[in-house]
Amino acid sequence: MSFIRTEQQEPVRLRLVRDRTRVLKQGYPWIFRDWLKDLPAAPVGSRAVVFDKDSKLLAFGMYDPAGPLAVRVCGVDGEKLNDDLVLAKLDAALELRHGLFDEKTTGFRLVGGEGDGLPGLTCDLYGDHAVLKLDGDAPSAFWNVDAVADWLAERLSIANVYLKFRSDAPTRGRAVRGKTPTAPVEFLENGKRFAANLVDGQKTGFFFDQRDNRARIGDLARGRTVLNLFSYTGGFSIYAGVNGATDVTSVDQAKPATEDARLNWRLNDLPEDAHHAVAADVFQFLEESRAAKRTWDLVIVDPPSFAPAARYVEKATQSYQTLFASALGVVAPGGIIALSSCSSHISSEMFFELSEVAVSRARRRATVLGVFGQPADHPFPLVCRELQYLKLILLQVR
């Protein structure tokens, strides 16, 4: 069974009108519409071969004649787009993760799309379950998820593989192998126990990309009161509790998420009276807390993406500044705040600038304790900084 659904089709032949040879050979994963001379009609997800301005074969991948990314690059000249290449990339992704994790972490990203040379294909592991996601129409037509499930069964003995559809799809997803999970699936992260709803939860069920940051912030929690904003299922909260926080408050607008945060707290045998899971609008919660002059020693602000597309950047910048300034108002003197953004359209430089504005608006002073990003199981090509989406600044506030 082939990994590529369109392998038997004749590839679409494309030609560059811009000189992008160097950046593509260095691993840039996308070819945009205006880089190409013509956009011939062909089914979405067709195999494509791309020639440079001198008619030399340069790259190959999957084609989308209607989307902004005309080609998602799977390889460059000297390689062949076939099952051997895909298998080699899957095995390389697995080898990298084997070097990163031991038995204390059974939940992580196994395949990270463009970062592992498999554009549009994501695979997250949750113990003996795997969740696949396909990013867009072209990857959905191109990748054969049944073959990926066979590989997971052969290499990792994964019996349950669930394909999760995009949020705008009429159904949540389907079981590719095994059964659709009807209850939260348990896994370990750095020895902490978590349960994730793989079907109804956000993304694939959990946010593995904050793993390293959870550990860093957990190390700072001992003896402190902690406020976790946009807490989802309580990842940062559990690390804080395990590491000796005296009191932890988790705030998320979604009540099911706060219930899951309570579940995860119990899974780690933490004292019930030390955790308060609050279902509330974060902006309103902060306003009421500031009015009541409540403060916490350690505050985590990990909002959803305010800029899902470039056209939202200006509005998102204002939203981040307002949110961060409000959160800074509930940090105790000498306390610590973690500010985060998961939007790829907010660059690191922009994030620093809007954080500075927020500190000024809050009439506070701050010292940087660290600047961090996504972990090693969320890699990205060096030449594609657009995929460096996660930013987190750790500040001590006075």
Image: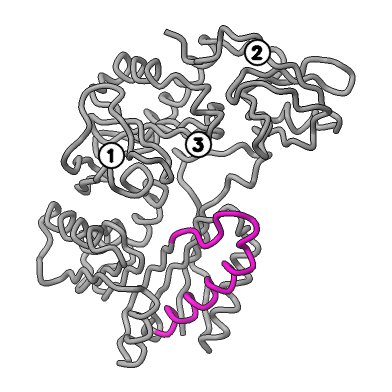
Instruction: Classify mark 2: residues with Cα within 10 Å, few (<14), some (14-19) or many (20+).
Output: few
| First-in-chain label (3 vs 2) | 2
Magenta span: chief secondary structure: helix
Q: Is residue 274 visible?
A: yes
Tags 3 and 1 in contact by the CB under 8 Å rule? Answer: no
Q: Quadrant of residue 35?
A: top right
The answer to whether one can see residue 91 in this image is no
In the depicted structure, whether residue 342 falls above or below residue 366: above
Q: Is residue 314 magenta?
A: yes
- Labelled disc at residue 135: 3
Q: From the viewer's perspective, is 59 left or right of 38?
A: left
Q: Which residue is mark 1?
A: 105
Q: Secondary structure at mark 2?
A: loop
User: Mark 2 — residue?
Assistant: 79
The residue type indicated by label 3 comes to Asp
Q: CA distance from mark 3 to mark 2?
A: 24 Å
State which region is magenta. 304-329
Q: Is residue 354 left or right of residue 253?
A: right
Residue at point 16%, 60% (across, down): 262
